[in-house]
Image (cartoon, rainbow, N blue to C red):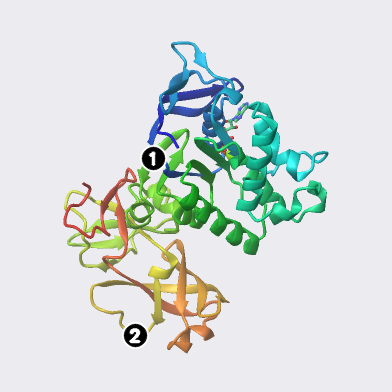
Amino acid sequence: MSHVRIEGLTKRFAGKPPAVAVDNLSLEIEPGEFIVLLGPSGCGKTTTLRCLAGLETPDEGGISLGDQTVLDVRGKVNLPPNKRRIGMVFQSYALWPHMTVRRNIGYPLRTRRVPREQARTRIEEAAELVDCAALLDRYPAQLSGGQQQRVALARGLAAQPDLVLFDEPLSNLDARLRDQVRAQLHELHARLGFTAVFVTHDQSEALALGDRLAIMKAGRIEQLDTPERVFEEPATEYVAGFIGMSNRLPLLRQGEGWALASASGADGQAGAESQTVVDELPVPRSHSEVSARLRPDDLQLCPAEEKPPAHSVGLPAEVVDAQFGGRHMDVVVTVGGSRLHAQAPLTGKPWARSLSRGQRVTAWFAKDVAIYYDADGVRTAGHTPTAAVGA
Ligand SMILES: Nc1ncnc2c1ncn2[C@@H]1O[C@H](COP(=O)(O)OP(=O)(O)OP(=O)(O)O)[C@@H](O)[C@H]1O
Ligand SMILES: [Mg+2]
């Protein structure tokens, strides 16, 4: 276990146009902490891991692991991968096909010149950890996908590294196996207490595994926080969109109240037909436009002739599609020019089962479950359990 410090890390790639894959990124990781890097394709997650591992030559910055400086661009320090006490588990299991499971797991021990007897013990312990002790003499082609993934985990952990890097290690597994290996990994981390940086673009994986999440955008960290805070209080609209608040309703101030802005209008101006949909919102007076962000299960539906509850915003909506989801219906509706997703519970409300395309309904949400973002995408109000807004 060690404390990891990344300071001002920058990595550019030549090309047309040149890419700044990692842009002045700083991050401190506590010993034993499990950090998740979450972000869309191309935002620099893998490059950050490769810089940590010593597989890239960064342009600027420094990295230290415990009291060891492994990178200092100004000081011309960049230790090679085998001089860093780091384990790696990648998306493609990248097991060597011509090596048995035993030799695969032992690979990082050989590169570190661990004596043979000690290596043997470590390999068997690592295999035991991930339930693969019975597979040691098989070849990768003789294993199922989940077994291969577990062997890759064992290989990442075998050298008892201070830091383990995971690059979307579960994304090749089917849904059931992914849940199983994820639970195993969570338990392993609790037991062994290694420091981890785990890359994913799956929000539920991030929430489940991370002590803290770093939401990345274009080579930078947009928000660094506990899973609870990222989930409940995404700091920017970008983060909100990434953490499941897929519904966006643009609103414009109109007199004392707010009207739906036509989402299709390129200039963002409300059309002539726009009407006030809500008298007031918990938004500071200084804002003339906001967008409300909502999760699908926070958007409710009721028959058009019914009045939604007090302290909510009710909007005339038209059903585009409704799919049966077991205990709920997944419903797509249009509201003004916006396409929104609602999850309508069926328990006690069989009405939702009969929803069909073209049907007019009322979509509504409680004012205080939405999070409101200003024109720059910064959270201005909503979802703050304490009184401090924007703290
Ligand atoms: N070897 C390379 N040469 C040139 N550009 C590169 C190279 N590797 C990565 N990039 C660019 O750097 C940026 C970040 O890439 P990176 O692989 O770190 O993204 P990522 O967040 O891991 O994405 P994904 O989720 O798709 O794996 C991208 O714009 C990518 O095109
Ligand atoms: Mg990647």
Please name the amino acid that badge 2 sits on.
Answer: Glu
**Does residue 166 appear in this view?**
yes
Given the image, on which type of amino acid does mark 1 rest?
A: Glu
| 214 vs 363, nearest the viewer | 214
Above-or-below relation of 388 to 220: below
Position of residue 341 relative to residue 44, above or below, is below
As rendered, which of 178 and 159 lies closer to the eye? 159
Q: Which of marks 1 and 2 is nearer the N terminus?
A: 1
Q: Kindly report the distance in space between the C-alpha atoms of the residues bearing marks 1 and 2.
A: 41 Å
Residue 232 located left or right of residue 184: left
* 131 over 5 or under it: above or below: below
Q: Name the residue under label 1.
A: 222
Residues at badges 1 and 2 in contact (C-beta under 8 Å)?
A: no
| Image spot of residue 31 (x, y percent) | 40, 39
Residue position for label 2: 306
Question: Residue 210, image x and y in percent?
Answer: 44, 50
Task: Report the residue at 46% width, 52% height from top.
Answer: 190
Residue 28 horizontal/vertical position (percent): 37, 34
Q: Which of 71 and 32 is in front in this view?
A: 32
Instruction: For ligand 1, tell me if the residue under mark 1 lies within 8 Å.
Output: no
Residue sitting at x 81%, y 41%: 97
Relative height, residue 202 to residue 176 (above, below):
above
Residue in view at x 26 percent, y 65 percent: 368
Is residue 89 at least partly visible in the picture? Answer: no
Q: Dot 2: within a 10 Å radius of its alpha carbon, few (fewer than 14), some, or many (20 or more) residues?
A: few
Of tags 1 and 2, the one toward the viewer is 1
Q: Is mark 2 within 8 Å of ligand 1?
A: no
Describe residue 377's horizontal placement relative to residue 156 as left or right. left
Report helix, strand or loop for mark 1.
strand
Q: Ligand 1, what quadrant?
A: top right
